[in-house]
Image (cartoon, helix red, strand yellow):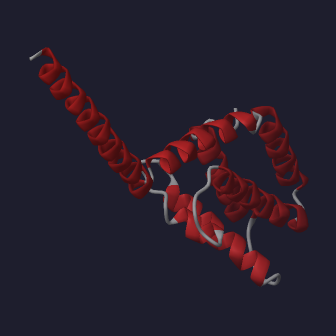
Amino acid sequence: MIDQIINIINSFKWLGVFLTLIFGSLVVILIVKMQIIDKWLKTAGNFLLTTAFPKRHLNKSWQKILLRLDKNDEANLRLALIEADNLFDDLLKQIRLPGESMADRLKYLDSSQISNIDEIWQAHKLRNQIVHNPEYPITRNEIEFGVRAYEKALKELDFID
């Protein structure tokens, strides 16, 4: 009688091991299919990248852009906008927004993430105008608008002070 009970318990053990292996495999397949680990690593990576990209480095880069604005000659004004655009795009790449170009990456952002996303789009389009058409007439106010749009977004995202 005791031998029968032990046999029943042993068969349940094997059934338990078998079911554990099956369900464990299903969990692993589910994790792989849903890319849970990949999403977690990207989220953790974004956090590590944003903390690893020192704010003081960005503040220095931003100060150089602002110095270009102060110089008040057309070449420095144009460069200020181009450099602000490049800095912002570099950060979008650092946080791993997908896309071949900055415009592609900007499509993943909306006003819930950056309150002045429309201004960023305007600034980026203005940057494209001056890069692709060096003779494009531009005013200091237009350049300042673009640079200040990037500045507002960078402050809002807490990348610069």
Establish if 98 lies above or below 150.
below
Question: Percent from the top left, x then y, of residue 11?
Answer: 21, 33
**Quadrant of the drawing holding the C terminus:** top right
Establish if 111 lies above or below 7.
below
Q: Which residue is drawn at 62% across and 42% down?
A: 45
Query: For this rendering, which residue is in front, 35 or 81?
Result: 35
| Residue 79 picture quarter | bottom right
Establish if 38 lies above or below 3.
below
| Residue 59 picture quarter | top right
Question: Is residue 114 something one can see in this rendering?
Answer: no
Label total for image: 0
Q: In this view, does 8 lie to the left or right of 92?
A: left
**Quadrant of the drawing holding the N terminus:** top left
Q: Residue at x 57, y 38 (%)?
A: 44
Query: For this rendering, which residue is in front, 98 or 25?
Result: 25
Question: Percent from the top left, x then y, of residue 102?
Answer: 64, 67
Question: Percent from the top left, x then y, of residue 17?
Answer: 31, 35
Of all residues, the one furthest to the top in this rendering is: 2
Question: Is residue 82 something one can see in this rendering?
Answer: yes
Q: Which residue is drawn at 90% across and 53% down?
A: 71
Question: Percent from the top left, x then y, of residue 122?
Answer: 58, 67
Q: In this view, does 133 lie to the left or right of 155?
A: right
Establish if 18 lies above or below 132.
above
Q: Which residue is drawn at 64% across and 72% down?
A: 100
